Structure formats: structure tokens, C-alpha cells
Image: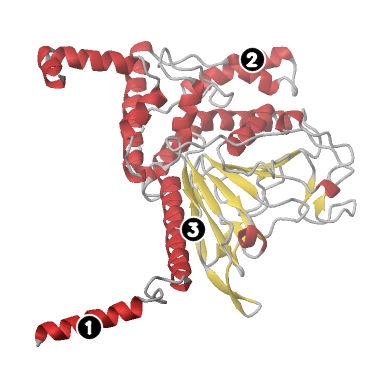
């Protein structure tokens, strides 16, 4: 019956019918059909191929339709609490122009972003994703770019693709003798790459420069903006503090290092809150430790950060996001100061642009860290959560940062690294169950351990019968 039916329908008709059926299915349903019965590795391979097809589709559409328009709404929202509406409009116009035709200062972004995609900067499993010079842009207030044409993908689907492309390295190990014991001083460090793409990086950098310009015009609170005189190499980087005022050392008023509770600074800018939401949603930061303050560092060539451990007025973990230029950060229980802006330590970790370094555990509390003199212009934003008992007296919580939840994971949105880790975990659990079952079985009473009544007599009868046959 089946053979007759198959023979009566031409192959082309069957193919058309199959394609028609596939068109009625959603993307997730198609993925489920195609990957049914696949192992984790094959699922990851299929996801990679689909991502490439989607990226090529986006590339073709962007070439045929031209560049997407820059959203002015986000920029006006970003500046609304810091300036007049007229200045916001002018700032929005300038921002759109600068994004379409980047200034030379942004030349490091493209170069740095290429480094993110290289195997040297990202986990080898992640390097298989080929962006083909195009990034999937999310309409989440970060990219500042509207969704590309009729792509056929929802915002959720685009986010899932971007989320799957994030590289995550969490296996840093370096043992040092601490209190007579071998200790992994890097325990708790994580490096997440591809969290912010090139377009988003330009948006964030432009926002930082706008804030710096406002600070220079005294449009920010006095303790928000600081631009000390560069009196020697490595000294004098620009800093901006949002959420709380923090002292690196005893200030002129006698306040000790840590959060100054009776000082006020500007609140977190809207764009920075969008960055926090992205990091929590994409499992970079835990939802149990959402940052409510940050410090922006603007480095010129040669500027540095000396060896230190972050003050415990801030909870763990905290994170640093890097922009403009890739640089290295040193870690170790003992770091040496060689000369102004030059340090030595046992571990050097490169920080690609657009990446997020998480500091937690021993990596935050046992090992010191420092940034030697940077090779070119660099911006970093360090996000931290204040200890509630050390918050400024007049601090007002950011309502939109309350109750943040991470993105729900599914097999097709997990990166190959995440899938590989889960596969190892499942294998370990399976081996444990096998060992446990074997151990239990060895203690169970089997049929041969204690024969039933009469079995011994029957065995003897069998032996007797065998002897009689031989005779």
C-alpha cells in the first residue's frame, strides 16, 4: 500500500509537499524535527549551520535594503535626566552621524572585535560561529539600531542566537602557597566574550564620551566626575562614579577608603542599566547580585591601575566591561611594581573589547589584580553591588533593576561549551548510578548464594548420573 502510494507521486511533488509542510512549522519546531535523536555535539553543529544561514540572510538583506536607521528615541532617553530637551536633540543628531561615520578613535573597536572572534581570544568551541561581517542586532535599547527588515525572526529568536554565541571561560587555575596551603588564587574568575557586539560597543563608547563632556562642563555632580592632572606616567586617568561615591584613599575631609555615605553622585545612566539587564539576562551576572553602582575609567595611552583588591563595601561578584582596546590584566597573591605604570605578576589575562570579566571567590579576595600601562585609548566600566549596610544615606534603589530574571535555557540556545559541560555532568551522574547499582547488587542475596531446599540433593543426583554415564 505504501509502495503503491509512493510510486504514484512524483519526487518533485513529494518534495514540494515536504517543503509546504516545513513552511507551516515554526523555527523551533523545525529545529526539533531536524535534531531529533542527535547527540549534544551534533545539535551544536546543526545550530552553528543554522546561525550561518541566518547571518548570511541578514547580510544579503542589509546590502539590498541599505543601513538601518539609528534610533533617536534611545539617545534622547539616555540623556533626558542629564540635560535639556534641546541639548538631547542635538546630541541625538550628532550620535547618529558618529555611528554611521566613526571617528578615528573607534578604529580600535573593529580591530579589537576581530580579536574577539579569533581562537586566541575565545574558547575554541565558540570560534566556529562565523558572523560574516554582520551582527544580529537586538532591539533592546543597546544597539541603538532598529531591527533589520522582514528577517522572519522575532526579537526572542534573535536574542537566543546572540546568547548562544557568547563565549565563556571559567576554568582559570593558578596555585600559590597561601597560609601554607596550595590555593587556586584564580578560583571564581570568568571571562565572557561577545556579550556586546561592535555596534553596541560604539553606542556605549559614545555615551561615555558624552558623559565625559558633561563632566568637563560641570553638568554632573562634583564627586561624579574626576579628571586629575597627569603629573607622571600611569597617573591621571579620568573616572566617573555613578550610584555611590567611593574613596580609593583617605580624602581631604578625613573619610577613609570605601563608600562615602554622606556624598551624592549621579544615578546610573539609562544605557548602563540596559547593560546590567543584558548581563543578568544572559547569565553573565547572577540575579542574586545585581549591580547598583559603577565606575567608568577612561585611559589614555600609558595609564594604568595599580595592584589592589576591591573594597568589601562592595559585594561579590563584580565585573569589568572593556572597550576600544584590548589590554591585559595581571593577577597574583603578590604583584610587583617595576616602574611607573609597569607591573609584574604570575598570571596575565587578555581582555578583548566587548568582553566581561567576572571577579568572585579567590579571584576577587585572595589574588590582587592590576592593569599595566595600556597601549592605546581604553575605556572600562566596572559594575558593583553595594553592601546594604554601606549604601549612601540618600540612595534611592533603581526600580527597573529589581526582580531581574535570567533567560530561560533550552537545548538549542545553549552554547557548545555549555552543552559539553552538561554532557560531562550527565555522564558523571550516570557513572555514579552504575557504581551505586553495582555496589547495591553485590550486597543482595542471589539465587546461587543460598540454594533453595532440595537443590543440593538434586545437584548430587546430577553428579551421580554423570558418573554412571562415564562408566
Give the CA separation, mark 1 to mark 3.
64 Å
In the displayed structure, would residue 457 be above or below residue 356?
below
Give the residue displayed 89% in from the left and 41% down from the top: 393
Q: Nearer the viewer, mark 2 or mark 3?
A: 3
| Viewer-nearest residue: 238 or 406 | 406
Residue position marked by numbered label 3 in the rendering: 171
Sequence order check, earlier mark of 1 and 3: 3
Count of residue discs: 3
Sequence order check, earlier mark of 1 and 2: 2
Q: Nearer the viewer, mark 1 or mark 3?
A: 1
Residue position marked by numbered label 1 in the rendering: 463
Mark number, residue 90: 2
Percent across and percent down for residue 465 are 18, 81
Q: Left or right: 19 with respect to 81?
A: left
Q: Quadrant of the N terminus?
A: top left
In the displayed structure, would residue 465 be above or below residue 382?
below
Give the CA separation, mark 2 to mark 3.
47 Å
Amino acid at each position: 500500500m505504501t509502495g503503491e502510494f509512493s510510486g504514484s507521486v512524483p519526487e518533485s511533488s513529494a518534495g514540494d509537499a515536504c517543503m509546504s509542510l516545513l513552511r507551516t512549522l515554526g523555527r523551533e519546531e523545525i529545529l526539533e524535527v531536524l535534531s531529533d535523536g542527535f547527540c549534544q555535539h551534533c545539535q551544536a553543529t546543526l545550530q552553528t549551520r543554522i546561525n550561518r544561514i541566518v547571518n548570511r540572510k541578514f547580510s544579503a538583506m542589509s546590502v539590498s535594503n541599505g543601513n538601518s536607521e539609528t534610533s533617536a528615541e534611545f539617545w534622547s532617553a539616555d540623556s533626558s535626566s542629564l540635560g535639556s530637551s534641546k541639548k538631547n536633540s542635538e546630541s541625538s543628531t550628532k550620535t547618529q552621524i558618529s555611528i554611521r561615520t566613526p571617528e578615528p578613535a573607534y578604529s580600535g573597536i573593529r580591530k579589537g572585535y576581530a580579536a574577539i572572534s579569533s581562537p586566541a581570544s575565545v574558547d575554541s568551541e565558540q570560534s566556529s560561529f562565523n558572523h560574516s561581517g554582520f551582527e544580529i542586532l537586538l532591539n533592546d535599547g543597546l544597539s541603538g539600531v532598529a531591527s533589520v527588515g522582514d528577517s522572519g525572526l522575532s526579537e526572542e529568536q534573535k536574542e537566543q542566537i546572540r546568547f548562544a554565541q557568547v563565549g565563556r571561560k571559567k576554568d582559570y587555575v593558578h596555585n600559590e602557597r597561601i597560609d601554607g596551603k596550595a590555593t587556586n588564587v584564580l578560583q571564581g574568575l570568568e571571562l565572557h566574550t561577545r556579550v556586546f557586539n561592535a555596534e553596541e560597543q560604539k553606542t556605549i563608547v559614545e555615551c561615555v564620551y558624552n558623559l565625559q563632556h558633561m563632566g568637563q562642563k560641570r553638568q554632573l555632580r562634583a564627586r561624579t566626575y574626576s579628571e586629575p592632572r597627569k603629573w607622571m606616567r600611569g597617573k591621571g586617568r579620568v573616572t566617573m562614579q555613578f550610584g555611590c561615591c567611593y574613596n580609593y584613599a583617605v580624602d581631604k575631609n578625613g573619610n577613609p577608603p570605601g563608600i562615602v555615605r554622606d556624598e551624592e553622585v549621579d544615578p546610573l545612566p539609562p544605557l548602563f542599566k540596559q547593560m546590567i539587564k543584558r548581563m543578568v539576562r544572559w547569565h553573565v551576572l547572577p540575579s542574586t547580585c545585581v549591580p547598583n553602582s559603577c565606575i567608568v575609567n577612561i585611559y589614555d595611552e600609558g595609564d594604568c591601575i595599580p595592584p589592589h583588591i576591591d573594597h568589601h563595601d562592595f559585594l561579590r561578584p563584580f565585573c569589568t566591561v572593556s572597550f576600544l582596546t584590548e589590554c591585559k590584566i595581571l593577577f597574583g597573591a603578590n604583584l610587583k611594581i617595576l616602574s611607573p605604570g609597569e607591573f609584574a605578576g604570575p598570571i596575565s589575562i587578555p581582555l578583548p573589547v566587548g568582553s566581561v570579566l567576572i571577579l568572585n571567590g579567590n579571584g576577587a579576595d585572595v589574588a590582587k589584580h592590576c592593569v599595566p600601562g595600556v597601549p592605546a585609548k581604553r575605556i572600562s566600566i566596572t559594575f558593583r553591588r553595594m553592601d546594604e549596610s554601606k549604601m549612601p544615606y540618600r540612595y534611592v534603589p533603581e526600580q527597573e533593576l529589581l526582580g531581574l530574571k535570567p533567560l530561560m535555557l533550552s537545548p538549542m540556545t545553549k552554547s557548545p561549551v555549555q552543552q559539553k559541560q552538561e554532557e560531562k555532568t550527565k555522564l558523571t551522574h550516570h557513572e555514579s548510578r552504575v557504581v551505586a547499582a553495582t555496589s547495591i547488587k553485590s550486597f543482595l542475596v542471589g539465587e546461587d548464594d543460598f540454594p533453595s531446599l532440595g537443590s543440593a540433593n538434586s545437584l548430587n543426583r546430577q553428579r551421580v548420573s554423570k558418573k554412571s554415564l562415564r562408566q
